[in-house]
Amino acid sequence: MDSDLTRRNRMSETMVGVIGGSGLYEMEGLEAVQTVSVTTPFGDPSDSFIVGRLEGVKIAFLPRHGKGHRIQPSSLNFRGNIYGMKKLGVQWIIGVSAVGSMKESIHPGDMVIPNQFIDQTKGRPNTFFSDGIVGHVSFADPVCPVLGSILQEAGKEVGATVHKDGTYLCIEGPQFSTRAESKLYRTWGVDVIGMTNLPEAKLAREAEICYSTIAFATDYDCWHETAGDVSIGDVLRILAQSTKTAKRAIRVAVQKLPKERKCVCATALQYALITGKKHIPEKTKKDLEPIIRKYLKSA
């Protein structure tokens, strides 16, 4: 099934990937559903992909932490997850995440569509370009502006309080911040704090997939003087409500996607690959074929 489905999905029809974070483990309303296991040179993705149609649009859904929330942030196979999306033919990825708010104006339950990231992770594999190939993609603007705007509109349409733009600080985890760290991060001017989305954004850009995040604030981290420290009970309560909102927003958003991608994401590798074709090991060419196929032909 893996090879047949991926061959069919190389056609031009729009396909949207949804990576569900904490609280979002399935997508109701999908039609013509298939469960697809995808193999990758980087190991297994977090789980099987659920492929179907939502409002007539092809969807590939993946629970980021696996069914039952089995995989902690530092152990996620980000390369396997994004490579699997690319292999299936995904052109757009919507990442859904729970985050902590670092600003008084972003209340628990609010939706944030970040447009910048700061990386405070340690040693996570976050590039496809190793093993004899070097690539340097532009990452000044790390999320797709087209998709970000669509998600903002969709959030407003379903009644969410939406904050567009802002900076997502990605920490290692799985522990939450210390109070000293939280207060330090506040001085950096960040808007939200999470543990997963930056590696996804980096790898999606390398794979020429448009990426943006729906981030729901569940708490004020531990910087807030009166809100209290992070409570798992409160987080889970807000997550349940936010998950319903995210699903409604995704249903609206997929209907607004343009048929043709004209953003920088679609051609991110055009001038990024530094290694000459004849110097790339054959195994690396084979492993990265879904990502660099068109550039191998023209090299």
Image: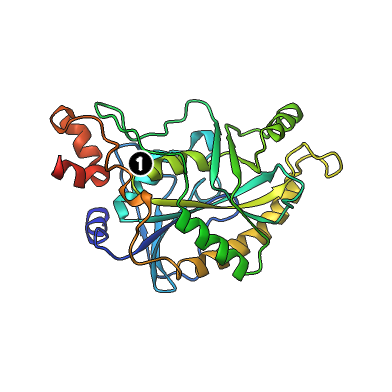
Quadrant location, the C terminus: top left
Q: Position of residue 254 (x, y in %)?
A: 45, 66
| Residue beneath the point at 52% across and 70% down | 252
Q: Which quarter of the figure has residue 287?
A: top left
Residue 24 to residue 219: above or below: below
From where the camera sits, is residue 146 visible? yes
Q: Measured from the top left, where is residue 239 in percent x and y?
A: 66, 55
Residue 28 appears in the rendering = no
> Of residues 107 and 45, which is closer to you in this image?
107
Q: Quadrant of residue 73?
A: top right
Q: Residue furthest right?
A: 226
Q: Is residue 175 above or below residue 59?
A: above
- Image quadrant occupied by the N terminus: bottom left
Say which residue label 1 marks: 206
Which color mode does the image show?
rainbow
Seen at 57% across and 38% down, the residue is 195
Mark 1: secondary structure: helix
| 39 vs 220, nearest the viewer | 220
Write the residue at 31% across / 48% down. Answer: 267
Left or right relative to 44: residue 11:
left
Horizontal relation, residue 87 to residue 151: left or right: left
Q: Residue at x 54, y 30 (%)?
A: 121
**Number of numbered markers:** 1
Q: Amino acid at mark 1?
A: Glu
Number of other residues with Cα within 10 Å of mark 1, as a class: few under 14, some 14 to 19, many 20 or more:
many
Query: Percent position (x, y) of residue 249?
Result: 56, 65
Q: Residue 160: x and y, percent? A: 66, 64
